[in-house]
Image: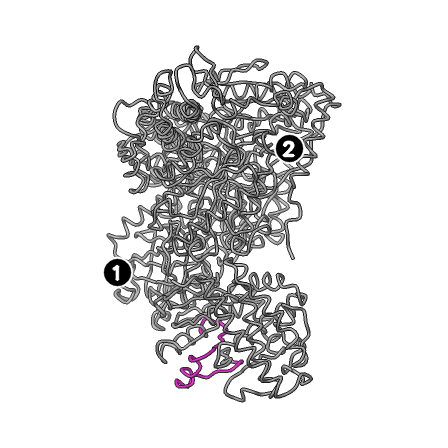
Amino acid sequence: MEQLKDFTTIEQMEADTAKLKEMACAACAETWEDRKVNQTPQCKFGEEGICCKICSMGPCRITPKASRGICGADAHAIAGRNYLRMAAAGSAAHSDHGREIAHVLHKTSPDGSYHIRDEGKLLRLAAEWGVATEGRDIYDVAHEVAEVGLMEYGKPFGTLRFLSRATDERKQLWEELEIAPRAIDREVATSMHMTHMGNTADADALVRQSLRVGMADGWGGSMMGTEFTDILFGTPTVRATESNLGVLEKEMVNIIVHGHDPAFSEMVVVAAETKEMIDYARSKGAKGINIAGLCCTANEVTMRHGVRMAGNFLQQENALLTGAVEMICVDVQCIFPALGPLAECFHTKFVTTSPVARIPGSIYVKFETETAMAQATEIVRMAIDNYENRDQSKIFIPESKQGAVVGYPCEQIIKELDGVTNSHVDERGSYMPAIDAIKSGVLRGAVAMVGCNNPKVRPDYSHIEIMKELLRNDILIVATGCSAQAAAKAGLLSKEAKFLCGAGLRRVCELVGIPPVLHMGACVDISRMMLLVTDIAKDWGVKVTDLPIVGCAPEWMSEKAVAIANYVVATGIDTYLGIEPQVKGSSQMMELITEGTRKLTGAGYVINKDPHELVTAIIAGVEAKRAALGI
Amino acid sequence: MKLLFNRVFDGADEMYAIAEKTLNETVAELGESAPINMPNTGYFLANHYSYLGKRVTTMGELKACFPEVKSWMRHEQRLGDAFKSGFGTVMAAEVIEACKYAKSSEPYGDEYHGHLSDAEVRELGVPLVTGDIPGFVVIIGPAPSDEEAVELIKGYQSRAIFVFLIGGIIDQAKRMNLSMGFPVRVVAVGPEIWCAAHIISFVNRAAMIFGAVQPGDHEAYDHYTFHRIRAFVNAFDPVADIVVACGGGAIAMGFPVITNDTKDMWPVPKSLIIQEDTKNFIETSLEARDIKIKVTKIDIPLAFSAAFEGEIVRRNDTWVDIDGSRMDCFEWVRTLEAHEVEDHSIELIGPDIDSVEPGSRMALSYVLEVAGKNMQSDFEPVIERKFHNFLNCVEGVMHTGQRDIIRMRVSKTAYEAGFRARHIGEVLYAKVKSDFESVVDKCQVKIYTVPEQLKALRAEATKAYDARDARLLSLTDESVGVFYNCILCQSFSPAHVCVVTPERLGLCGAVSWLDAKATNELDPNGPCQVVTKERVVDENIGIWEDVNEAVNQASHGSLQQVTLYSIMVDPMTSCGCFECICGIEPMTNGVVIVNREHAGMTPLGMTFSEMASMTGGGVQTPGFMGHGKQFISSKKFMKAEGGSARIVWMPAALKELVGAKLNKTASELYGVEDFVSKIADETVAEDVDGLAAFLSEHEHPVLNMEPLM
């Protein structure tokens, strides 16, 4: 009877991309598709992880003739070291983002640019960390909490505070395996040290450290980033928004915020909403100012302000190719250096704001906490001034956009679940309604869909195909990062997406009033997913590894994804990957990251490049977990 | 534990086997050409017709459909299959029942009701639409005891829920001589579980008759029943697989099943609820199906009608005078979590009104605690303000004021008729539940009469009142797009209209701009309407063409013009329930403000009551104006005449209450610090000479202002 009428297919998305590619050609602009062709074939040794250039005796690579590098490191050692270095870099990136946020928290003041928006969360965290709150000014508390958080990066002794949130079973296991992370920076440094020339050559030890440095991210830097961001900008709540390039406005000043750290983009959003700026834009002939997000900055600002999302990782060049973007303002991570030359083909101003991401061809405005609001206003003004420079002949804005409902952190999920409790028999404030739905079979399980885009596969195709199949099979999805954005573009974050679901999930969506794919935030918010799964295990009274809940990153590409995959596996959640980690040249490493970790943490990778085979494996994995539970 | 879906599948198979046997035997006995005519329906076998789109009129056609029924009973571990098997079970059940009707047009005689006629479906159309029948329950018995069976049925009856009975509970009801039948809304459908087919047939015909759902469009039936038919099932322990299979169909249609059986039972939120305490079936079920019972009768010994709204209880007729101007009496609505509210709990904490001598004063306050999924704190003052109307509707009870200046008189007649403190709770409960049903799911009332307790509670309530007022501070008349009018008081003062702006709350002090906005949202046709402010005439005095038009319309023509910021030119009118009144003092060119609690004299030579009589009733009296306390510190207070610098006298208590805010305003407007200390009060002057001396001594800014007249 009713169905999703305007679900956006991958073919429709690709048609938009093709049209934009024509615009690129007309403007003599190069895109990732061109560079991908230029890079093909890609280096086999790099791909398989058996090229070592850690010391200047190298590069060494493993071939049938040469089974060891000059120092004697074999394929397992080389692949293992490369893998650990990826994990360490990923952990460093996420955690440094978390650290930046901690510094912002430390600089909050009632009359500054940054304030405390979620006092409750701050006070809960203060209590958790033993920071005194009684009779203290909230900003004093915030500053001390920030300091305690910052100490987590470099404290000389002990393990991370957030580990205490885990289940007892996990805490004990991590201690036994010696993978409970110590200070965040220490795990990164240790990883770099272990992989330095002349150190660890044992693949098993390298994989264990990968788990540990990953944990330093997921149960350390990322978790802190998420918590502090909520305290600073408010814990997200449900909001309606829109997604895909159709959110760009023909007659407005379009400013795109892109990257991961929301500290500055929050200010840009606020500045663009001031009457002064809106009036200024009008004085320049625009109808207003339109902020749109890209990548995880989009996820952050959409779930706190409803700012619309232009798209995910591989959409960043497309956005500029519309010719209608006055400015792309970036912070950190996943920013193509290609934006520099690309912006030059259009009137677009490319603004970098972080010393961590300095890119040629950009205007560098070093964002300072103290002057953030004034800087943001200046930047918005610069974008408005640029409006008149648009070249009408270069403008093409695809019409595609989908409505989306976003903003389901753990707190919101529990609130939604409270809505289906019965006050005469149920307790509120727990995940029990979801657990009951899973136990009875109404929901078969849940999958955390995460990760990037990767040109190695058809962009967004794996995300969307896998999600649709999971929905058909009554498997609830929680999503973050570029995966969540792929879902948004397709229409899977709309409540109407229930019509794509099996009867069980559809009924759950109808009763609870949620879309079948729950947007939990940016990639840093995968830490939310760890808490979600942990608390479900606690409420259910089973181990995390028993739950019919798994993770899936079908199009991952960044080092952060390697760190994430490691902490997800360490947390006890099977992780299904659609891109092979670059360790294929070592049979031992392949065994270690799939079955090896399973023996340690009860979880491992399942790898399959075919999305349809991968989703079949996911469903089989979920059903196997159910069978083991007797449900 | 046996899996839930396996129970459905086994139950479906069981029903199918019984249907197959019955079908084969009946075909053998009657032949395939034997007609099937369900009595008094134009919808054939309504379930077959609905789900398969097929018109079954003979045994042969019934038999031909049978394989298709089987095809609905797939056994994959998915809810979709459990649902479809449930519908298959319903159709199989209909086969069994159809065979009975093929053999006899009255297979149940007088014992059971069996098939329901189309006329009966149509008869329920109107009460369903109006909500007079808030829902249906199907009880599958037997209950633990005969007594409990009847208690449950009567419980539903008293809530106007339509009751269908299947199985053992019917015998229990009969043993207890319960009157049953369609007219009393308790229908004994039949003895076996397959009789459930009649109820589903009834529901599916409702979908066709009222919802114009097309036969064969299976999903449309689910959609209609899920959203429109407020039905649910109560199934008593033990619940066999075959009942679970029928339950699968019921749940698919959106009808939750509530059971006390725990064996191999899997709770599913809002769908399959295990309630071991059968005494709690009714409340659990109503919540599960989101049924809110519309309270129509109020349990008080007096008449309740709008006819009594304007009734006055005179001092000599008063049994008890609950006087907020002298004692800690207040009314307060607050929101709690659902689990903290026991619906319809009315608690009296302290002595009742029978503990006092006739004609006495007494301290009494009531706190209404509400919970609701759509409840917002914005609605609290809106609900609270309605108490005045609600309580006034009780014969022999008079209520004035709001917040902590309420005054309520209970007449001797009312007392003698049995009216006691808890009846205040009954009235508030009943009216709040019915008038605010869109936001209040649960409601309880606590009535306090112990003075020491009242003091503490009043402080708590005051905090809440202050918080509401504080929210308004961030809003200004210029920053909002619209104002609102408020005609809540028109029951007393038919010509009066308040124009409520962010910086000028209603004169009663209880309707802020936010309140008015919330009221408008709650009830778009209610007492607060949007007033646009697009055509400005004079922003300083506060004249807008559209405001005048709105006032003219809402006062039914008795008021043509008002200014929002002047007390000299077309001041806003008063109903009579103002918190304060201000009046000009010609000698000093200032104004005197007095609040209702102040009983003493003012330098105008008039008390509050005397000043109040100068205005009120919707009459414009230049120079006198009723207003809310919070308006005193507003920058819009007498803006046209120079603002709050005109205030020369206020009672000390009022100065204390508004002092801080007023000082801030004066500092911002005039650069005058500690302005309140320049305002005289009853401790320094109760006459004009004393007042004038005080003002010059303290260099009151009014001395340098232009004459008022």
The answer for which chain carries disc 2 is A
SS assignment at label 1: loop
Residue B619 in sight = no
**Does the stretch in magenta take in B173?**
yes
Give amino acid for label 2: Leu
Q: Which residue bears the numbered disc 1?
A: B350
Evaluate whether residue B354 shows in this view.
Answer: yes
Q: Which residues are magenta?
A: B158-183
In the rendering, at what x and y percent does residue B72 appear? 58, 66
Query: Which quadrant would the N terminus of chain B be assigned to in this image?
Result: bottom left
Position in image of residue A410 (x %, y %): 42, 42
Q: Please name whichever residue, A538 or A349, is drawn nearer the observer in this view of the structure.
A: A538
Q: Which label number is shown at residue A245? A: 2
Q: Quadrant of residue A602?
A: top left
Circle 1 Cα neighbour tier, 10 Å, few/some/many (<14 / 14–19 / ≥20): few
Residue B407, horizontal then vertical, whole percent: 37, 56
With respect to residue B311, does A584 lie above or below?
Answer: above
Crowd class of label 2 (few under 14; some 14 to 19; many from 20; radius 10 Å): many
A47 over B575 or under it: above or below: above
Question: Image check: A510 left or right of B370?
Answer: right
Q: Chain of mark 1?
A: B
Q: Residue furthest front?
A: A65
As drawn, which residue projects farthest toward the left? Answer: B452
Which of the 4 quarters of the picture holds residue B352? bottom left
Name of the residue lying farthest toward the right: A393
Vertically, is B286 above or below A412? Answer: below
Name the disc covering residue B455, or none: none
